[in-house]
Amino acid sequence: MRARNLYAPTLRNTPADAEVKSHQLMLRAGMIRKSASGMYNFLPLGWRVIRKIEQIIREEMDAAGGQEIMMPILQPAELWKESGRWSAYGDEMMRLKDRHEQEYSLGPTHEEMITALVRDEVRSYKQLPLLLYQMQDKFRDERRPRFGLMRSREFIMKDLYSFDRDEAGMRVSYQKMYDAYSKIFTRMGLKFRPVEADNGAIGGAKSHEFTVLADAGESNIAYCESCDYAASDEKAELHPIEAPAEDMQPLEKIATPGTSTIASLCELLHVPVEKTIKAVAYQTETDELVLAFVRGDHEVNETKVQNAVGAQELRMADETAIQAAGGCAGFMSPIGIRKGTKIVVDPTVMNLYNAVAGANEKDAHYKNVNPKRDFTNEDLIVTDIRLVQAGDPCPHCGAPLKMTRGIEAGQVFMLGTKYSEAMGAKFLDENGKEHPLVMGCYGIGVGRTMAAAIEQNNDEQGIVWPRAIAPYEVVVVPVNGKKEDQLHYAEAIYEELQKAGVDTLLDDRPERAGVKFKDCDLIGYPVRVTVSPKGMEAGTVEIKVRRTGEVKVVPREQFRETVLDLLMTL
Ligand code: ATP
Ligand code: MG
């Protein structure tokens, strides 16, 4: 390709509305342009990256036994009603009607669609396992579209679905995908970590997220250096902490004016924070109140609370809902809360003796709260709802956990029979007995992976692509593109590289050298070959490695070998 004809409008300045590096650099390097909130056009350079990522994914999916198909984006509401997700999916699903008033979704994911596809055709155990995938646009009306391709409303996903005859088969398919994902991210040259994850709204038994490590990531990961445990903070399990046993003192209400925070409470009463109880009040999608309690120095893990009560969504509770249940914001405990209110208590709280908790009235607390004695509420749910923090003991080996940030680029799920049972997707075994298909699903966000790669690989000058997903592997730059002899010399080099199978761009624009070099660094081609009058005279070319800044001047006859050798290392 020749840069003269390339539609890659680069920008010198950082666009004001782009918060993260990847978004800024993709805009500046002329790879994407915004069309509307959370929706992007891909320009030629950006699209080349997407195609390369897709190709790596495709090769590994095929190698693992996957077969590529294509399903429609528009999905009939009936299918979603069969699985129960038409109502459960909530506002994130984009919905529309056709001229006959039939309802559809713009597919946010394809479990329903594919289950409907196979249920009519897969009849026998002999057809299993079956692994089908597609590479396609998904739509999610995200509450906060942001960070460019990282959280958009229309995005490309590779989604594969596995169908097996039993749980053991599903585990084999899951492992195949887990291994394929590891190969994919390794081939792309990214630092990543598979972490245990929450299954979320998709349901099922087990899940891992493939997280690309980067500070701009929205995922917090807890990991252990002593064993190989790693989990997202939503998932990370924590064992209850014991408290030293004490004689239970009588419950006593005390005045605590202006102490609606744990810090102010501890200061007033001179109690250690480990002997206080913290409350967070939520409401579910059906407005039901949920009160969650953790120890004063701990934080509530919203995902765990959501799972504990089986809610689709949680939001902070309104003052009126709290009052209606007999609570008082800032001064809450389970003691005296109205019957029928959902209360979830972390087991570490249940282990406390003579602690301090709210008295459910303004400016008042109880002291000598002994949860085992005093939390007599019916239907009290006691379960781990604590958010992991650095230093918490690893649930597997007890060593202190560390925390890091990352971007969830892919996720694999064991689904089991959730969709096949709801939608009647069955097969016959050797004995002619009917069973539901056992499923798994596996997604990779293609655009988000591109963004994650940039978050992990950039510097002051711009993007530093790993070779495997660079828009071009090598750029050939004649210092003066207006000079015929330089252009010819550069062209010969370009053609030689092309012939050697190297993905090359010839920057034949009649721009100043400085402008071209800046663009090369911004766009981030792994290798730059520069043709200058001096070099032409001496019979040499200059080779520069984007990642290290290393410059080599080699004889013209040797340049090809040098470039090929260098590329092997990038
Ligand atoms: P998140 O928790 O970040 O919202 P998710 O867990 O809902 O993502 P999945 O349903 O697991 O996403 O989708 C599979 C993959 O699709 C994700 O791992 C991610 O790479 C990508 N993806 C999901 N939502 C978006 C989005 N809004 N924009 C871009 N990519 C996305
Ligand atoms: Mg996910």
Image (cartoon, rainbow, N blue to C red):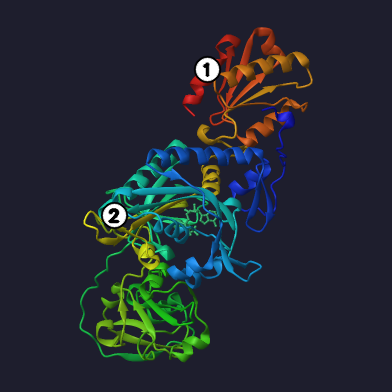
Measured along the vertical axis of the image, is residue 378 above or below residue 421?
below
Q: Say whether disc 2 or disc 1 marks the residue closer to the N-terminus.
A: 2
User: Element under label 2?
Assistant: loop
- Quadrant in the rendering for residue 374: bottom left
Task: Depth check: give the residue in front, 305 or 400.
Answer: 305
Measured along the vertical axis of the image, is residue 484 above or below residue 406?
above
Q: Which residue in the structure is indicated by mark 1?
A: 562
Q: Which residue in the structure is indicated by mark 2?
A: 165
Measuring from the top left, give residue 557's x and y in whole percent. 58, 9
Q: Nearer the viewer, mark 2 or mark 1?
A: 2
Q: Which mark is residue 186?
A: none
Task: Depth check: give the residue in front, 274 or 321.
Answer: 321
Name the amino acid, label 2. Arg
Q: Is residue 319 visible?
A: yes
| View extreme (front): residue | 432
Drawn side of residue 368 relative to residue 526, left or right:
left
Q: Residues within 10 Å of mark 2 (few under 14, many from 20)?
A: many
Measuring from the top left, give residue 237's x and y in whole percent. 32, 62
Measuring from the top left, give residue 560's x and y in whole percent. 55, 16
Q: Quadrant of the N terminus?
A: top right
Name the amino acid, label 1. Thr
Q: Residues within 10 Å of mark 1 (few under 14, many from 20)?
A: some
CA separation in Å, label 2 and label 1: 52 Å
Task: Depth check: give the residue in front, 452 or 227.
Answer: 452
Q: Is residue 297 visible?
A: no
Q: Residue at x 42, y 42 (%)?
A: 61
